[in-house]
Image: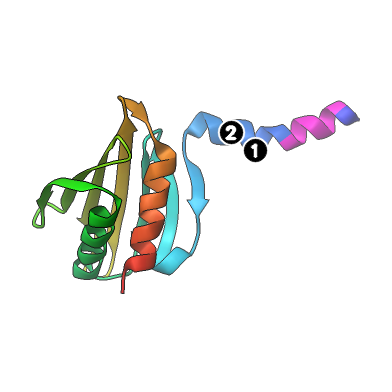
Amino acid sequence: MIKSIILLLLVPFILLNISGCWFIVGGAAGAVGTYAASKDTIQGETDKPYDSLWNAAQTVARIRGAIKSEDYSKGVIQIEADSSQVWIRLIRLTRATTRLRISARKHRLPDISLAQDIYTKITEEVK
């Protein structure tokens, strides 16, 4: 009896671990769904305009670290924050939907907590 209860509780966690995608934040500041896309990347879709997201990403990037490069047309900002390399990517999916993807690596290792923190700050900052 106890073994079957434990098994039923562990199955969802095992399936999530096998799939590699974890749901992190839901419904935050216009986000449709946010999840870890890989070991170093947080991404989500939002209904906020591209320009507003770009401005919010620039603001957060300047606060969090030094901007190394940025390209508005490609939607990429690279920064160095907390000894980590961070890539902020904006991808227009439709006129009304933009994907925000944050990747962070510290000494070539994933820094998912920094990526999640920057993602959250950008979605809070967007107007």
Spatial CA distance of label 2 from label 1 is 5 Å
Q: Which mark is residue 15?
A: 2
Q: How is the image coloured?
A: rainbow
Q: Quadrant of residue 40?
A: top left
User: Regarding mark 2 in the picture, which secondary structure is present there?
Assistant: helix
35 horizontally vs 104: left or right: right
Q: Is residue 41 above or below residue 99?
A: above
Q: Which mark is residue 51?
A: none
Where is residue 43? Give x, y as percent. Answer: 36, 49
**Amino acid type of the residue tagged 2 in the rendering:** Leu
Residue range corresponding to the magenta coloring: 3-9
Q: Residue at x 30, y 70 (%)?
A: 48
SS majority, magenta: helix
Dot 2, how many residues are within 10 Å of its Cα: few (below 14), some (14-19), or many (20+)?
few
Where is residue 73? Give x, y as percent. Answer: 8, 56
Q: Residue at x 37, y 44 (%)?
A: 115
User: Regarding mark 1 in the picture, which secondary structure is present there?
Assistant: helix
Tell me, yes or no, whether the two marked residues, 2 and 1, touch with CB atoms within 8 Å: yes
Name the residue nearer the viewer: 58 or 15.
Answer: 58
Q: Residue at x 30, y 35 (%)?
A: 83
* Residue 53 falls inside the magenta stretch: no
Quadrant that contains the N terminus: top right
Residue underneath mark 1:
12
Where is residue 67? Give x, y as percent. Answer: 17, 48
Q: Is residue 4 above or below residue 50?
A: above
Dot 1, how many residues are within 10 Å of its Cα: few (below 14), some (14-19), or many (20+)?
few
Where is residue 90? Give x, y as percent. Answer: 22, 55
**Amino acid type of the residue tagged 1 in the rendering:** Pro
Name the residue nearer the viewer: 81 or 38.
Answer: 81
Quadrant that contains the C terminus: bottom left
